[in-house]
């Protein structure tokens, strides 16, 4: 068990800017040279074509503010951002799949 938290960050593309303009902002603000902050792990970074980029970050809770401030100072202007608390569902999925073989609707088992 880890004490880390996960946050999913949406970098929504601003379609009034092209890729060169977005890169100019990110490079000028030092985003590429400083993100993520020390102690923060990038779990995944995906591009959703037509929408933007989605990052899942893992960090100790005390790093959340630092990540937020870094994104505010180094990514704003290039993207609109959204943040969501996140957790890994894979262990739950495995349990649900194991239960699926013997599952019966509650009406059949008498449970409500």
Image: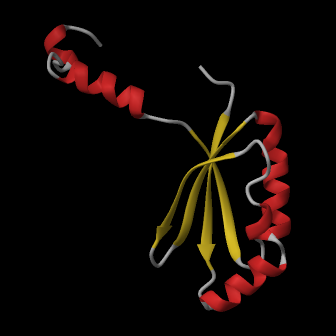
State the residue at coordinates (19%, 24%): 100
Q: Is residue 80 above or below residue 110?
A: below
State the residue at coordinates (46%, 69%): 48
Q: Position of residue 64 (x, y in %)?
A: 78, 44
In this rendering, the count of numbered labels is 0
Residue 105 placement, left or right of 40: left
Residue 78 placement, left or right of 108: right
State the residue at coordinates (63%, 82%): 14
Q: Position of residue 16 (x, y in %)?
A: 64, 91
Closer to the camera, 80 or 42? 42
Closer to the camera, 69 or 27? 27
Q: Position of residue 26 (x, y in %)?
A: 75, 77
Closer to the camera, 44 or 68? 44
Q: Quadrant of the C terminus?
A: top left
Residue 91 placement, left or right of 76: left
Q: Is residue 88 above or below residue 47?
A: above
Q: Quadrant of the N terminus?
A: top right
Quadrant in the rendering for residue 33: bottom right
Q: Position of residue 45 (x, y in %)?
A: 54, 59
Question: Does any portion of residue 57 appear in the rendered image?
Answer: yes
Quadrant in the rendering for residue 32: bottom right
Residue farthest to the top, as pictured? 110
């Amino acid at each position: 068990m880890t004490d880390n938290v996960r946050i999913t960050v949406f970098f929504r593309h601003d379609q009034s800017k092209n890729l060169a303009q977005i890169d100019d902002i990110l490079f000028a603000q030092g985003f590429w040279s400083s993100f993520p902050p020390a102690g923060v792990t990038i779990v995944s970074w995906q591009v959703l074509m037509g929408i933007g980029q989605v990052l899942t970050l893992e960090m100790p809770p005390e790093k959340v503010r630092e990540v937020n401030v870094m994104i505010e100072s180094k990514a704003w202007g290039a993207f609109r951002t959204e943040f969501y608390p996140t957790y890994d569902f894979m262990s739950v999925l495995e349990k649900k799949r194991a239960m699926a073989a013997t599952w019966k609707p509650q009406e059949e088992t008498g449970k409500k």
